[in-house]
Image: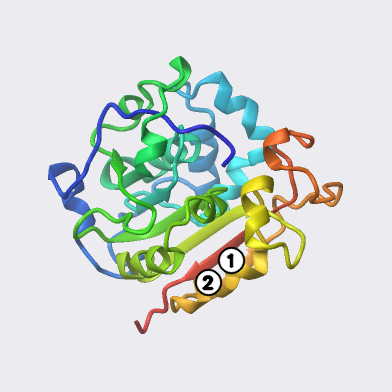
Amino acid sequence: MSEKPYAFGRVALALGPALAGLIACAPRDAARPPAQESPRARFEAAVADPGRPSEDRERDAVRRPIEYLALLGLAPGDRVLELGAGWGYMAYLAARVVGPNGQVVAHNPPDWAAYPAPAWSKGRAEKAPPGVWVDHVAPWDAPIPAGARFDVVLSSFAYHEVVIAKADRDAMNLAVYAALVPGGLYVVADHHAAPGTSMSEVARLHRIDEQRVRREIERAGFELVRSSPLYENADDALAEPTCCERFPGAQHRFILLYRRPERS
């Protein structure tokens, strides 16, 4: 994980008014309102939002949020779940893009939620468009609010943390599959480990073998749309733990974009 999690001011443990818009299960593009501006302009406006703390802006050079949002294809009205949202770097940007007709659920497991929030991260949910951001505390392997459906599910440098927590990754991936509308995206970014790196090394390195992640996600029924070189860094020898910041925030990382098949 690239950032510590925080304790929540607003927590949704079950379906309530803030999550009512997540129940609909139409295909991803069916319910989008007409866009009034170009996607690039929306992404640039989200990144330039004055409510973003300086600590987030310092990460932008390596997180490349405009390009990443473009990969996701987020649009107004989308319903987004981020698994292991931590302090909410990406969840906040997503909330700005999906706007008042969309929804962003920032998931964290209970042990992450116990961390105290740094002062600069507090109040982030309140700065998002009213009613758009929902915090949700739940185990890794049962991360979906009851009855909720999503257009996009993100895992930003958190998949290896599920391994460290010894949670059931098959159960998590199947839950994500069930919660996505047909054609919905499951996007996983994480730190590369050397091919064949053992599971016992994941906790030490905070890295994971991309091929293992692929096998596990595809076992749940997802179709690979594409992988992206956006976060590649050939200077990373893959030997150092990512938390050591030998390459500060710029380790060799992969992005996998999967889709729940339209036919399912």
Expressed as whole percent of the image width and height from the top left, the position of residue 137 reads 30, 42
Residue furthest out toward the left: 17
In-image side of 125 versus 91 (left or right) = left
Q: Amino acid at mark 1?
A: Val
Instruction: Assign a secondary structure to mark 2.
Output: helix
Residue topped by disc 2: 216
Decide which of 83, 161 is in the foreground and name it: 161
Expressed as whole percent of the image width and height from the top left, the position of residue 23 reads 19, 59
Residue at 57% x, 48% y: name it: 157
Expressed as whole percent of the image width and height from the top left, the position of residue 154 reads 46, 53
**Is 36 located above or below residue 226 in the figure?**
above
| Dots 1, 2 in contact, CB < 8 A | yes
Residue topped by disc 1: 213
In-image side of 12 versus 174 (left or right) = left
Instruction: State the image quarter where residue 244 is shown.
Output: top right
* Image quarter in which the N terminus is found: top right
Expressed as whole percent of the image width and height from the top left, the position of residue 142 reads 31, 58
Residue at 47% x, 75% y: name it: 222
In-image side of 114 versus 259 (left or right) = left
In-image side of 153 versus 45 (left or right) = left
